[in-house]
Amino acid sequence: MAATVETSLPAEIDSARCGTEEEENRGLEMEEKSQQQTGSTGPTVPHSRLSKLPLARIKALMKTDPDVSLASQESVFIIAKATELFVEMIAKDALVYAQQGKRKTLQRKDLDNAIEAIDEFAFLEGTLD
Amino acid sequence: MAERPEDLNLPNAVITRIIKEALPDGVNVSKEARRAISQAASVFVLYATSCANNFALKAKRKTLNAGDVLAAMEEMEFERFLEPLREALEVYKKDQKGKKEVSEQKRKDKEKKNDSENDKSREDEEEEEQRMEEPEEEADEEEVEN
């Protein structure tokens, strides 16, 4: 798919997470720009391309919650998009620990360290195999 | 066939792509790390959904809307997501609007051939979901537009 854009990130990883915000935004902008170019002739761009994750799968996941009756299309899309941002965030945060260990390969323990250290990931504690 | 949360995973290829695009070149990700991130993403969806649903229920709505999700992000301390999410939502809305106009146009063209009464009832059914969203979204419009 030509829409895949390889955003070149600076070689130095800012250990302060505030620095990653800009990169995330840039990544998103570039993705949308390329999609607008390819789909500019009309409504031929399937909305699922705005989100990398399949909306049907996200919706199915949401519906496993017995308290959820209906979800608007927009809400499913936003959750899909937020999940994308979440994956980017946790990968970058885990990378910091790999680098501390002088490794270039992200490992499970790096994830565990990030989850333990970062407040926003507290909800993940005890949930992963 | 009820699907349990454990059975529903997000596609590996997509998760891998998102990870790779977020990390600099030359960095690898072990299979175990990838699997863990994918699992974490599923948990994130469930947690966000539950949180958003609470906002909907508080507002006495049965349909989860975008505003609920944004409120959930704030509650979950992911404020950093709010700006990019709002921007993405704008693009998404425009895209959806364009599609709706096209399908409405197609339907109008059909009407010229078919019985107009039959088409009208079909139109109402399809638009029901959309209509349900609109009044609810107006209430939260302030949040979304900010």
Image (spheres, helix red, strand yellow):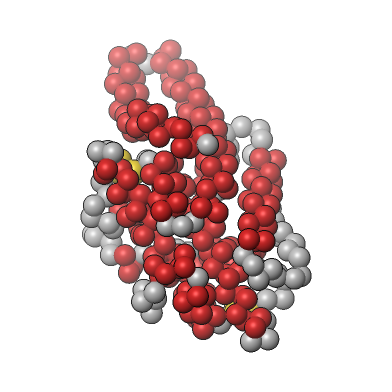
Q: Horizontal and vertical percent for residue A83?
A: 48, 58
Q: Is residue A34 above or below residue A85?
A: above
State how many labels appear.
0
For the point 35% across and 49% down, the residue is B52
Query: Who is closer to the viewer here, B123 or B41?
Result: B41
Q: Quadrant of the N terminus of chain B?
A: bottom left
- Is A54 situated left or right of B30 in this image? left
Q: Horizontal and vertical percent for residue B103?
A: 47, 27
Q: Horizontal and vertical percent for residue B57?
A: 26, 44
Query: Who is closer to the viewer here, B85 or B126?
Result: B85
- Is A118 situated left or right of B20 in this image? left
Residue A60 quadrant: bottom left
Query: Who is closer to the viewer here, B22 or A55?
Result: B22
For the point 32% across and 55% down, the residue is B50
Residue B101 visible from this viewpoint: yes
Q: Is residue B98 above or below residue A97?
A: above
For the point 24% across and 52% down, the residue is A67
For the point 54% across and 80% down, the residue is A110
- Is A20 situated left or right of B140 in this image? right
Residue A43 quadrant: top right
Q: Horizontal and vertical percent for residue A112?
A: 48, 79
Residue A75 visible from this viewpoint: no
